[in-house]
Image: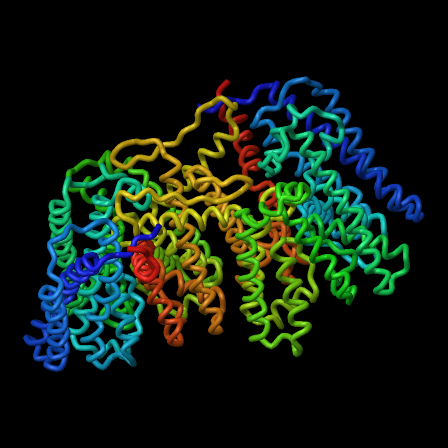
Amino acid sequence: MLIRPDRDDLQVIGFYLGKVMVGVGYVLGAPMLVAAVMGDWDDLTAFLLGAGLSISIGRLAERRFATTQQLDWSHGLVTAALSWLLGAALFAVPLDLSGHYGSYVDAYFEAMSGLTATGLTLTQDIDHMSVSVNLLRHITHFLGGQGIIIVMLTGLGSSSGQVSTLYVGEGRDDRILPNVVRTARFIYLVASVYLVVGTIALTLAGLVAGFSPLRSVIHGLNLFMAAFDTGGFATNSTSISYYHSAAIEGVLIVLMVAGALSFLLHYELWRGRRREVLENLEVRTIAVTGLITTSLLLLGLARAGTFTDVGSLFRKGVFSAISAHTSTGFTVNASRMFVTDWGRIAPAALLMALALGGMASSTAGGVKGIRVGLAAKSVSRDVRRAIQPDAAVVAVTYTQRHRRRITDAPVRSAITILVLYVLLFLSGALVGVYYGVPFEQALFESTSASVNGGMSVGVLEPGTPLPMKLTYTAQMWLGRLEFMAVFALLGYGIALVHGRI
Amino acid sequence: MLIRPSDADLRLIAFYLGKALLGMGIMMVPPFLLALVLGEYDSATALGIGIAVAVSVWQFAQWRWHSRAALSWSHGLVIVAASWLFGAAIAAIPLALSGHYASMLDAYFDAMSGLTTSGLAVVQDLDHMSVSMNLLRHMTHFAGGQGIVIVLLTMAASAAGDVSTLYFGEGRDERIVPNVVATARFIYLVAGTWLVAGTAALWVASLVAGFTPLRGLFHAVSLFMAAFDTGGFAPYSPSVSYYHSALIESVLIVLMVAGALSFGIHHAMWRRDPRRVWRDSELRTLGLTTTITIAFTVLGLAYAGTFIDVGPLMRKGVFTVISAHTGTGFGVNAPRLFVTDWGQVAPAVVVVAMALGGMASSTAGGIKAVRVGLTAKSVGRDIRRATQPDAAVVVTTWTQRHRRIVTDQQVRSAVTILVLFLLLYIGGAVVGVYYGFPFDQALFESTSAAASVGLSVGVLGEAPVVLKAVYIAQMWLGRLEFLAVFGLVGYGWALVRGRI
């Protein structure tokens, strides 16, 4: 029996959505400040409008739906799914007003791509975008990467009991510390330490590469947010190849890998427990898949004869592989080169790396290491079961903080999500094929959107048909929330219509 | 700890393997007799050599490794996996001697394709093959198809408790008839009935199409075995389009669907229990996916403008999807037309249909409807779980004979095999891409091999040796649904690394 959500349910969802919207307004304050300092008056107006809209709607909702009710599991999921939709809609307002987008849909795409830390872009003439708007694009990465709701709500002083379900809704299910607020504080701590250190390193690298001090700080900050949150936007149309700097690429590799590590692992590293790093199932899985995809990629590049010398082959190959596997999406060559110059094997390896993705509870997207690892362990258990005498008890264990035995329930959910991702990749590719894109390119672009990767083979551009843009937007949203929250939203809709009281 | 198999284990396996290989010899007897009757003495010699090899291998195994020990589960797996490997080698002997194959590997390819009921073929100048040799090709479908059904049901019946639920989605009490011998007899009864009725129908249809009685009978028998065992070989190179007969195509559709139904459904129909048929969750899943894939294929064909009028569009579209979904692989147009004339959408949907496959414990290949259905049910449960109050208990049920609550264990095994199939499809496609084929064509061909279908877009015709070997491995893995192959590999591993 389906139970129809009542007035109280909708009230509590509306209340928390209001809070998130107010938060979006406050966040717009940062680029607003930059716009004021730099004298970009047009953009300042756009930010003011966006912030005004967000705060007024948000406050109205907060007042209208004021409640002290607790969020339960389904409320949390629905609120999470909706806040990503609404948050993107609000951030799209100043972006659209900046004049760099063909339509509001394009701006919405960009905001969703930013918030989901994807990095696919529809910006036109990005090389002449104002510093403040460009900063906003990268801030959406930071905000979305760290978990939009968790940032907003814990930042705005809600208690832990109220927001813990939202935390799960955003696809982060391991609680490192006893309660969500303390977990969130720890996340801030780690993120800010990386922020300071990473930005300084990138600024220095920028100075070495010959930037003026101010520009190198701007680029350093933007690059940091795009790399550590495995986003993939860049301040220039040529992405990382703009810099021609091995130092910058080196720092970015470190940051991308740091971004793809789970916060559990950051926590253990923080505490100085190196054993966890070596024994953790997810770390081991990613090490193996990373090695395989990188070597396949290098092999493919060598076979296709893309580069004449070994140095650039390794530099571009390894950087691209890491950028794809961490689902960041920085590129060191033009998009169409993947199709025209990379042969067939190397893009396929890149696609595999994209699909696999980083670690769960990180900003990386994709199927995630833990699911791949659990699936592999479960198969190995079946194989061992098959060859042992009928009476033998076969137990396979894995380590994640503790040594655990493989049981059916987590394996079931891991592989189910894995299958859903594969279906998402394929269905997006079919939409592309319908619009006349060759299958392999359509699959690449669709996978890149679904895993919040952001690499492109050039299928996506401002002239792409509208249904494809919408498909990619939906894929980014579904992929970031790992399906559950979106399913809950759908189910909620059905229950509203068909449910009984 | 890994235990090394002892000498007694190996003797036992070799002994039973010998028995299974004798089956290959028996399979060659009807074509051999036919060759004598028709005076095809070259073919008769080739078949005679094949029979001699099979019989001597069997006799040697009987004499050298005679054993009375009981088979355990892992022995069974190893024997099954090895039977298909070595059985194909023996069936390949007369094929290679027929002179229609460029190499021993090509003959082995066709033998494996026949025994796994795939239907991909690398035979040359098929249109001038002797009647008896052509019959042998179709006999491999029948032997392999009925063989795998018995193997699957026996494994489901005799497996250690958790393994059987793991890989069959249906527990031990799902045995159709209480013991293995009775089950096998029932299968012979059903297959025999279909053989008589199906061949008769096809014979009549071919007479209507204008065949002479004798040729009509030969085509009817061959087509029956290829259709009911969801194989896909055909007596002539243009496959079913050779006949230009709507009647033959309709009879084949019925036979293909019958072949893709599980023996549970056949049993229910035999017992005249329509409720059990109608309520069966796996059958409903199959019905749903078939409807969807047909609809999208027809849409895609209409969109691409492949056919000028609606009649041929529906006829060719529906036949092709059913041929793909049941894992048969009859074609009603030339392979390259999929690439040149079918547009982008319709072939993509055909790949999906092939990948999904028929029902478990049938001769169909692919992922199988039970796994697709269980996965969908489980996702549906998760969605309902997410929208209900925290304290609500949410369960989902699956009906196969009885209505039961879906457990995590069932779903885990279903999605595991599903993922392994996807990896197998994609893995083969990557090898194809490595040899320079476009990804979509390589994926089509790889899926066709791994799901035991047999439709081709022409990649196979130009495939280098390595790619052919990959397709052979895919047909083998896909047919045995991984487990038996894993058993064999694990056994080899244990032989080398295990302790006594």
Give me the residue at 69% from left, 58% from top: A253
Give me the residue at 36% from left, 71% from top: B468
In terms of depth relative to the viewer, which is nearer, A214 or B402? A214
Q: Is residue B26 left or right of residue A407?
A: left
Q: Is residue B477 left or right of residue A184?
A: left
Residue B432 spot, x, y in % from top left: 45, 69
Q: Residue furthest left?
A: B37
Residue B500 spot, x, y in % from top left: 28, 55
Residue A442 appears anywhere in the view: no
Residue A36 appears anywhere in the view: yes
Residue B423 spot, x, y in % from top left: 44, 57
In terms of depth relative to the viewer, which is nearer, A308 or B190? A308
- Residue B269 vertical placement versus B143 (above, below): above
Indicate the quadrant where residue B451 lies.
bottom left
- Residue A188 vertical placement versus B196 (above, below): above
- Residue A326 vertical placement versus A401 (above, below): below
Give me the residue at 19% from left, 36% from top: B273
Q: Quadrant of the N terminus of chain A?
A: top left
Residue B401 spot, x, y in % from top left: 25, 35
In terms of depth relative to the viewer, which is nearer, B271 or B112? B112
- Residue A421 vertical placement versus B327 (above, below): above
